[in-house]
Amino acid sequence: RFLSIPTLGTNTVHCYDGHQLTVRSVKTCPGTGLKLEASSRAYVLSSQPLCLTSRFHVRSSLGCFWGSLVGPHGPNNTVQSDLEPEATSPTHLPKYAGHLPMYAGHLVLGLRSPFAEAQKVPAIYVLGDSLVDVGNNNHLKLSLAKADFPHNGIDFPGQKSTGRFCNGKNSADFFAEKVGLPTSPPYLSLVSNKSGSNAFPITGVSFASGGAGIFNGTDQRYRQSIPLTKQVEYYSTVYEDLVQQLGSATALDHLSKSLFAVVIGSNDILGYFKSGSDLPKKIIQQQYVDLMVMTLKDVLKRMHNFGSRKFVVAGIGAVGCCPSQRNQNKTSEECNEKANYWSVRYNEGLKLMLQGLKSELNDMDYSFVDTYTIFSSFIQSPSTYGFTEVQSACCGLGNLRAQVPCVPVAKYCSNRSDHVFWDLYHPTEAAAHLFVNAVFDGSQQFAMPMNVNQLIAA
């Protein structure tokens, strides 16, 4: 793919840390996927200002480069992209004078794919379950909730099974695209590769984990996940890392402009209503969903203590209508109305809780995403959204392809964009894309008291 920056001119670059990098020479370098023709095209970036970012991200996106750095207090040293001056420094440029600090800022490239949008926020931090897991569970040896095998990822770039429970990109990917950022990488992949002074990426991290719930015990049937309380604990380490990198004041300013997406709760509801569950014997439904809401409130308050200010909190979707639940009604294949009813009751409690929390924390803003209404619209009016199949999974085996999960021996459909559901629980890439569009651009029917674009501007 060619590199181009059609939207970035001298007067259109807004860097959150005030630093701009001017690229003066670019070429391919070891360890990057940059092709020669892209490198040649990238040479045209001469005198184009970019936002400063990590060596790694610039190299992987742009190749080896030399350039100059200008900050709010005037020009800085000439910088290069890596530790190999012999391999990267053109003879007509000054001798190497310094390195780009790791994760010192942001880069907005007009790569013809996810980065075509202008960067709207400094970072996205994602907490949640398999709906937004981008690979954390790949690093959990005991977990049964994994998607790092075919046919998952069949429509992902390179047809890679990345750990996303989807045929392609999931909601977390499209969320990042909408704000002009790369997908926030999985925390556990960063920890496994992190050594010494390497910092976490300043553009965000994902802590989401397949099988996770609001309650710590929700993941028992999957043996291992990152429960929500642990996800917040991991986020606190990223917070401390940011403070160390940027200083307390700058880190808090960075976080106050960032988005915090919280997509969780479906596994708690499904776990309560699954066949053989002993939860109904221990706690009645209303108490259960009330406890879910209050537990999540405590989590959000703790995140607020660590600098989180702008929350995108997703309600639970029509989980009773996913193929796994329809398959339980073998005669009619209708939705599990009990699961749907209590999903709605949870969402009602969640909305009230967020309103109350906003009154407690004046500097907090939020967008409640009505996942239930959005996916119910897909199911009830499929032709409006380009769908033809709303009951059956695309990938799986048995009735509604929901009796056996999407494993390598399963069958999968060729018309994936016509399906709402990829497997017995999760939406297709097409449904995820439409969902995120509604979250960002929709009316208060879908996101309240404001959509995500309005939240960004708040």
Image (cartoon, helix red, strand yellow):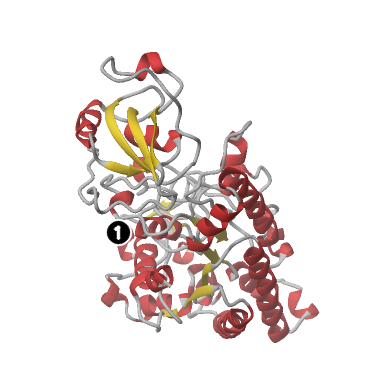
Image height check: is 340 above or below 49? below
Residue ID at (35%, 30%): 33
Count of labels shown?
Answer: 1
| Quarter of the figure with residue 139 | top right
- The location of residue 244, given as percent across then percent down, is 62, 44
Looking at the rendered structure, the secondary structure element under dot 1 is: loop
For label 1, the crowd category at 10 Å Cα-Cα, with few meaning under 14, some 14 to 19 and many 20 or more, is few
- The location of residue 386, given as percent across then percent down, is 27, 70
On the picture, is 266 further left or further right than 368?
right
Q: Which image quarter holds the N terminus?
A: top left
On the picture, is 151 further left or further right than 135?
left
Residue behind mark 1: 415
The one nearer the camera, 80 or 152, is 80
The one nearer the camera, 231 or 159, is 231
On the picture, is 149 further left or further right than 23?
right
Task: Give amino acid for label 1.
Answer: Asn
Image height check: is 208 above or below 373? above
The one nearer the camera, 182 or 42, is 42
On the picture, is 304 further left or further right than 179?
right
Residue ID at (42%, 23%): 97
The one nearer the camera, 390 or 124, is 124
Q: Is residue 57 visible?
A: yes
| Quarter of the figure with residue 3 | top left
Q: Which image quarter holds the C terminus?
A: bottom left
Which residue is at the far right? 282
- The location of residue 122, given as percent across then percent down, is 45, 55
- The location of residue 148, given as percent across then percent down, is 51, 44
Image height check: is 275 above or below 3? below
Image height check: is 275 above or below 153? below
Q: Is residue 125 visible?
A: no
Which residue is at the far front? 73
